[in-house]
Amino acid sequence: MLARMTSSPAISIRDVVKRYAPAGGEAKLALKGVSFDVPQGGIFGLLGPNGAGKSTLINIMAGLVQKTAGTIDVWGFDIDRDMRNAKRSIGIVPQEIVFDPFFTPFEVLEIQGGLYGVAKALRRSEDLLKAVHLADKRDAYARTLSGGMKRRLLIAKALVHAPPVLVLDEPTAGVDVELRRQLWDLVTEMNNEGVTIVLTTHYLEEAEALCDRIAIINHGEVIANKTTRELVEMAREKVVVLTLDRDLGQLPVDAAFLKSEKTGERTIEITYDKDKSNAGRVLAAVQQQGFSIVDVTTREADLEDVFVSLTSSAA
Ligand code: ADP
Ligand code: MG
């Protein structure tokens, strides 16, 4: 592993712009001046809907896509001035699975080790296969592996040169629940061994479960960058859904309501701040205004609500 930097961020991204200008196609501003730091040692989530620009950013770090403007330091190395060291500091697991189907997992790792100039004696192909639970597939053809096994092999491949930073682009997109758990465990294990992890996802529960810090990106812009706890804390809202005994003329109003909304002939949704009020108070206020309540359910806001409110207001 490369010498550990002192307290600088594992990755530092400043004002990164990417404009795709495909020949004959329409130009697209995929990143509109993105800046954030990934601190060392944690699991950092880059969260955003499809098309937000996550893969573009990661592919720029990997040297696969040319940025239009801005700077990126990986482990203290500027990717423009010192791509060699920047590349040695990072392992990237791409979103798309691509392998030569005729190599075995062991060969895939040995070839990658060769590409990175890892001396034969220092290669850890066997250990890496064990780490991703593929030791028994050492000599199988890559084409015979299941989707989940291929993804795990890609993780091992990204770790061949023992980078201090591992970036995973949508590692669990389209995988089943069990495999998702396995990948979460694997990511956690790697992190416990000291590897800084960056992972992109559009699954909020995944980000909430795994990441200690989350940046949310939408339409090529960072719209939030906070600890996971801070983000979830933003969801102080609670919703009561009421069915009333008659059609509504006027909506009930009360100082404790943040919002009330008619969602059907006889149903309303009332949003309140759970630190300042409670469902009982909301119901009492509605009844006092002459409405009879036929049915009640409540909804707790979560990261999903924060995400939806942030991404829809920035649209
Ligand atoms: P995400 O990974 O968050 O889903 P991407 O980085 O793949 O988002 O895409 C961001 C935007 O850039 C999208 O609008 C996408 O269509 C566009 N885009 C991505 N790659 C290319 C490309 N090679 N040429 C033109 N546009 C692209
Ligand atoms: Mg993507």
Image (cartoon, rainbow, N blue to C red):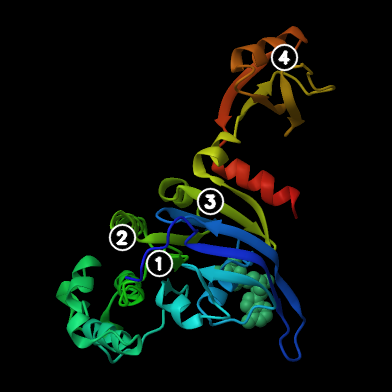
Front residue of this view, candidates 162 and 220: 162
Return the residue found at the far right.
249
Residue type highlighted by circle 2: Met
Q: Where does label 3 land, which residue?
A: 214
Q: Does residue 254 lie above or below 48 as drawn?
A: above
Of the residues under marks 3 and 4, which one precedes in the sequence?
3
Residue type highlighted by circle 3: Ile
Measure the C-alpha gap from mark 2 to mark 4: 52 Å
Q: Where does label 1 land, which residue?
A: 166
Question: Does residue 63 appear to the left or right of 273 in the view shown?
Answer: left
Q: Secondary structure at mark 1?
A: strand
Of the residues under marks 2 and 1, which one precedes in the sequence?
1
The quarter in which the C terminus is drawn is: bottom right
> What crowding class fits label 2: few (fewer than 14 Cα within 10 Å), some (14-19), or many (20 or more)?
some
The answer to which image quadrant residue 264 occupies is top right
**Circle on res. 190:** 2
Q: Residue at x 33, y 60 (%)?
A: 183
Front residue of this view, candidates 8 and 242: 8
